[in-house]
Structure formats: C-alpha cells, structure tokens
Amino acid sequence: MTNIINIFKNKSKYTNSIFHKVRKILQDNGYEVSNYYNKNAFLNLVIGGDGAFLNAVHLSNFSSIPFIGINTGHLGFYQEIEVNMLEEFVKDLKNGNYKIEELTVLESEVNRKTLNAINEVVVKSKKNQIIRVKVFIDGNFIESYSGDGLIISTPHGSTAYNLSANGAILHQSLNGFQLTPIAPVYSNLNKSLKCPVVLPNDASIEISVSRRDNYHTVFIFDGREFFTKDFKIKISVSPKKINKLILNKNHYWANIKNKLMWLLKGYCIKYISYYIFSYRRSNFSPCALAIFNYYW
Ligand code: NAP
Ligand code: MN
C-alpha cells in the first residue's frame, strides 16, 4: 500500500479552505496528496457534498480505490467526516480504525454502450410531457407505464430522488435495487403501477420507450443526462462495487436520523399544529393566523 491520497473537491471557496487545512494535516502525518487521480493511491478523499462525491466517482471511472468524504456544508449523505473532525479522521486513518463498505453500482446498456450509476438511473422527458414506456423484468412484460418517468435506484441512492418520489429507503446492507414511478398516470387510458417495486440483485429491468416519446426521453445517470436516439435501456446490478471507508459503524443511522428524520419531524409538527389551528380557527384572530402562516 502506498501513502498517496487523491483529493477531489468542488469549486467552493469554503471547500478550498478545508482542502488546504486537511492537506497540511495529511502531509504532517506523512501522507502524499495528489490533486489528480493517481491509480496508485490508497484513498480517494472527496471534499464537498454528495454532488462532489458523485462527481469523484464518475471522474475516476468508478475507481476501486476506497472513497471517503469531508462534508463542507451540504446535505452530505455520502460525506461522513464533518469539518470539525479532520484531526480525528487522520488519526483513525493512521491507526486503521475503519471498515470498508461496498456500495452497489448499477449497470445500464444503451445502444451497446455501458453506463454506470451509484444513486440511480432516471428515465424521463426533457420536455414537460408524459412518457409512455413498456417495462420488462427478467424478460417478463410487467406494465405499460405512463407518467413523468421511472427511477431505478440503489440502496444508497434510495435516500435521494427515489425518496422524493415516495420510494422506500432501502437499508444499505440489502442486496437489491428499486423501481419507483414518478407521478404515474392512472386513468381509463393508462393504468400504471403506482407503487415502488424492490428487486433482488440478479434481476434485470428493460425499459422500452414508445416511438412517439422517443425524441424527448432522456436517460439520466446520477444526474448526468445521456442523449441517445436509441429507445431501449437495460438495467441490472453491476459486478463492480464502490468501496467506501466507514469510520463510525453507526454512520448510516446517524445520517437517517440527523439528515432526514428532522425533516419528517418538522412535517409532523407542522401538520399536527395545522390541524389544531384549523380546528380552532374561529377562536383565533386574523392576526394570529397570519403569524402562523408566515412561520410555517
Ligand atoms: P443536487 O441537485 O444538489 O442534489 C439534490 C440533493 O440530493 C442534494 O441535497 C444532494 O446532497 C442530495 N443527495 C444526493 N445523493 C444523495 C443520496 N444518496 N442520499 C441523500 N441525498 C442525496 O445534485 P447533486 O448533488 O449532483 O446530486 C444528484 C442527485 O440529485 C441525483 O442523483 C438525484 O438523486 C438527486 N435529484 C433529486 C431530485 C428530487 O429529489 N426531486 C431531483 C433531481 C435529482 P448535497 O446537498 O450534499 O449535494
Ligand atoms: Mn448537490
């Protein structure tokens, strides 16, 4: 094992200041820092938010060198190290106080090209239009779907776009992936499946876009749009994995609790108080209601 660490960062000034700080700590501890992707490195260190993490994974072409991230003020679901933990992180790194977790990678075939994603693959319109597609799972025709589109997400990606589209949070240790509809149409004309479907690791999904929607449908890999004239995509779990260093074994639940649950709690408080207010609406002055509406 070498002592080389590749650093990936986003363009923010704050990230840059953290970069200088962590570089100094790493160098003081005998590590060599590389500003470009060096295939002999033993670690890929990403400074920024989840966007920076996804970028680093794509830029390094889904490198097998383990990743770890420093969160510089974004949601940072993938970014375990907070900026006040830099010294602690380097100490843990030196002492080997970490474990390696494997993240699922999706593999898609479009027009004989292979494209990878770690959050999700999205099939949707680049215009404000419905797309009509046929969905096959393991070669079996499942449904004719109409709606905004479909999300195929990994367990780690399940807390991103998938969650906003009412998909389930899949635990990180599950071997599988999820198909979630975005605003499915359910009418006399179209009866699209309205709920998410969780599939095992060896399943494959084939989506075939109707010819009439072909010209405005895009395939998106972790937010990166891929334009093609082809109208078929086949998605399965790749044999590739992304290795991620984990310092705190409770990181996953800490993330769910601190970065997602407070939102849920906020909504609960909002709706409970809204119902109390609505119920007693007649007892409140317009001024009190205006203040309530302003704060929520
Ligand atoms: P972005 O527009 O900044 O991402 C949207 C938000 O998703 C950011 O807050 C990002 O965290 C967070 N995020 C990314 N991956 C996550 C994960 N695995 N779990 C929980 N949150 C996650 O664009 P971006 O940073 O390049 O991220 C691309 C991702 O955005 C896509 O892969 C897709 O999942 C997501 N997206 C979501 C929606 C939606 O929710 N309606 C729509 C389009 C795309 P940071 O703030 O740390 O970057
Ligand atoms: Mn982002």
Image: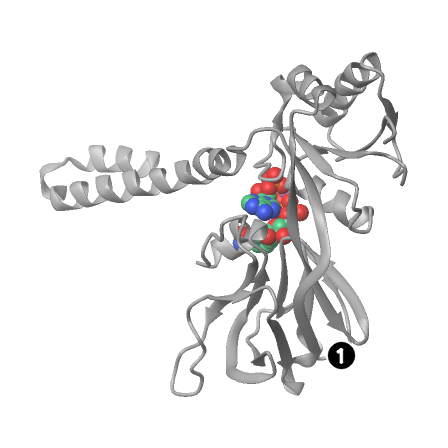
* Total residue callouts: 1
Q: Which residue: 63% across, 77% down?
A: 206
Q: Secondary structure at mark 1?
A: loop
Residue 175 position within the rendered picture, expressed as x and y whole percent measured from the top left: 56, 57
Q: Residue at x 58, y 69 (%)?
A: 128
Residue 262 visible in the displayed image: yes
Q: Is residue 288 left or right of residue 12?
A: left
Residue 59 placement, left or right of 268 = right
Compared with 257, 109 (above or below) is below
Q: Amino acid at mark 1?
A: Asp
Residue at 64 percent of width and 21 percent of height: 83
Check the picture and name the quadrant holding the N terminus. Answer: top right
Rendered image quadrant of residue 262: top left
Q: Of residues 20 and 291, which is closer to you in this image?
A: 20
Q: Residue 169: where, in percent of width, then height?
A: 47, 52
**Residue under label 1:** 230
Q: Is mark 1 within 8 Å of ligand 1?
A: no
Where 47 sits versus 65, above or below? above
Percent x, y for residue 277? 18, 41
| Residue at x 74%, y 71% (from the top left corner) | 109
Left or right, residue 102 beside residue 41: left
- Quadrant where the C terminus sits is top left
Percent of width and height locating residue 208: 64, 81
Whether 25 is drawn above or below 268: the answer is: above
Identity of the residue furthest to the left in this view: 283
- The answer, for residue 180, to whether it is visible in the render is no
